[in-house]
Image (tube, rainbow, N blue to C red):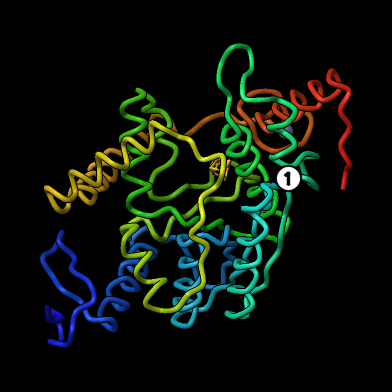
Amino acid sequence: MKCSKCGKEAVYHARYEGKYYCHKHFNEMVEKKVKQTVRKYRMIKRGERIVVGVSGGKDSVVLLHLLAKLRKRFPFEIVAITIDEGIEGYRPPSVEIAKKNAELLGIEHHVYSFKEYIGFTLDETVQIMGSFERGERVGACSYCGVWRRWLLNYAAQDVGADKLAIGLNLDDEAQVFLMNIMRGDIARLGRTGPYYEVIHKDLVPRIKPLREVPEKEIVLYAVLNNIEVDFSECPYAVEAFRAEIRDWLNEMEEKHPGTKYQILRSYDKLFPILARHYAKRELNRCKICGQPTTGEICKACQFKLRVQKKAKELGLTFRVK
Ligand code: SF4
Ligand code: ZN
């Protein structure tokens, strides 16, 4: 097939718009989407310091490259941070990849580890807590998600960031939207839209410049442009519900190209209404760590106390870094 723009050999067929792209025009199309998303939601202002959470996986590494390109058009600062959860065999190689990419782009890079800032690696947490708590399955992802959010915000403040950019793509956004609808968690949808206003002065606003880019295009962008990314999967990844939604969405996209974009558009139309009702929350400071929280003690500190208590009961001690 030939590129719809220049007639050269095509490398990609965007079924949702019925167009074919050669390598050059595919790059331009992806870069333009990111530029337009950033502009549409005023995600980045001139001179701001943007911290990018880079895990080493395809989304965050491609995000780093795309923001580095965008920076050439209007000036802003970029700092990369990697959260090391302490997952043996999986995280060390991806931390290296994140580091290499930052170096290649001449971007300052910092690593923040669970071990140093929480006290336990994720592997140790799993060892202490086991897979079951109070009869319920509380997986590694519950601890990991809460601690990662906490540490990302801490790290973003630590490096003096104005905004925190995360590599969520179109597929992620559509999946999260559907999952929250199916769980009846509308309140969450009012707090995780296309942009985050300043909710609290200690909560670094999050931006998602890749939210209009399908996952497929991110993978292809990395491959075509020889960007080194880590494609391996976390050994704890067992979120069955999300996997079902992902498979169903892919099937729908196959049958009805453009479904994912339509879901995103619905979300964008609903977001301002939902945000009016749910975004504004009174936030206190956590009595232990001082980070913003709705209660008295933030979830990250609650989890940490829970693990500390269980480790003590079991008589386990862990080397503190
Ligand atoms: Fe953490 Fe779960 Fe993601 Fe693994 S799959 S990095 S444990 S949230
Ligand atoms: Zn806390």
Look at the numbered disc 1 and say if its residue's Cβ is closer than 8 Å to ligand 1.
no
User: Which sits in the foreground, 124 or 16?
Assistant: 124
Residue type beneath disc 1: Phe
Q: Is residue 4 left or right of residue 179?
A: left
Among the 4 quarters of the image, the one containing residue 105: bottom right
The image quadrant where one finds the N terminus is: bottom left
Residue lying at the far top of the rendered structure: 135
Asked if residue 152 shows in the view, the reply is yes
Q: Is residue 36 left or right of residue 261?
A: right
Disc 1: CA contacts within 10 A as few (<14), some (14-19) or many (>=20)? some
Q: Residue at x 45, y 34 (%)?
A: 239
Residue 167 appears at what percent x and percent y? 47, 57
User: Which sits in the foreground, 142 or 297?
Assistant: 142
Residue 188 appears at what percent x and percent y? 43, 32
Residue 41 appears at what percent x and percent y? 37, 58
Q: Check disc 1 and report its element: helix, strand or loop.
A: helix
User: Which sits in the foreground, 273 or 298?
Assistant: 298
The residue where tag 1 is placed is 114
Q: Residue at x 74, y 23 (%)?
A: 306
Q: Residue at x 16, y 50 (%)?
A: 254
Q: Is residue 142 left or right of residue 3?
A: right
Among the 4 quarters of the image, the one containing residue 24: bottom left
Q: Is residue 184 left or right of residue 294?
A: left
